[in-house]
Every structure is written in structure tokens, then in C-alpha cells.
Image (spheres, rainbow, N blue to C red):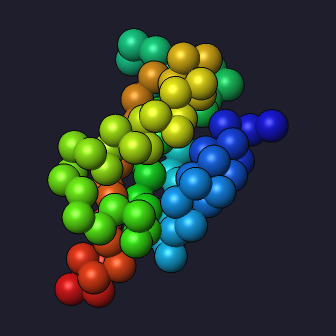
Amino acid sequence: MEYATRIRQKLTDALAPEALDIADESGRHAGHAGARPEGETHFHVTIVSAAFAGKSRVERQRMVYGLLAQEMAERIHALGLTTLTPDEANR
């Protein structure tokens, strides 16, 4: 299974996002540390979820990193995150 698909499945199952965008930015990092010719090493995830309500930015990021720990250990070198509540996304 592709890593983008794994990310989508895990975040959807755990956080029931209202919006989820996963961008594979690996091509922009060719030749950089952690880059692989086959890609899927550098991602940016934008996620809107009510599960983030009342949590700090760091707590939200820890939630996502915890859910994707296996993928981070196996392949993902860099993961950029934008984590928003539905209210924040609607502002």
C-alpha cells in the first residue's frame, strides 16, 4: 500500500476529519537527506478535525505523529502539518 494511502486511512479512522489533504512533496526534495528515488518520503498534511478542539498546536501534532509512528520509522523523512479545528478552518 502506498504511504499516502496509509496516511489517509489512519488519519481518517482516528480523527474523522472534515477535510484532509495529503501532498507528496518528495519531488521537491530530490538529493536532500532522506529522499529516495521512488518518492513518498516528504509529505505535507492539512487536516481539519473536531478532535483538535481544545488542544494546542503541539498536542495536535503529537496526535498525528503518534498515529503515523510506523510510517515515520519506515519511510517518511519529513512531515509538515497544518492541523485545524472546523471553526479555525472556517475563519
Q: Nearer the viewer, residue 72 or 23?
A: 72
Residue at the farthest right position: 1
Which residue: 39% across, 13% down? 33
Q: Is residue 12 left or right of residue 63?
A: right
Which residue: 40% across, 44% down? 63
Which residue: 69% across, 42% down? 6
Q: Is residue 78 left or right of residue 56?
A: right
Q: Give residue 73's quadrant in the image.
A: top right
Tell me the quarter of the image containing the C terminus: bottom left
Q: Nearer the viewer, residue 87 or 36?
A: 87
Which residue: 44% across, 52% down? 45
Q: Where is residue 51 drawn, in percent x and y?
A: 41, 64
Tell me the quarter of the image containing the N terminus: top right
Q: Is residue 49 above or below residue 61?
A: below
Q: Where is residue 61 drawn, in percent x and y?
A: 32, 44
Q: Is residue 50 above or below residue 91?
A: above
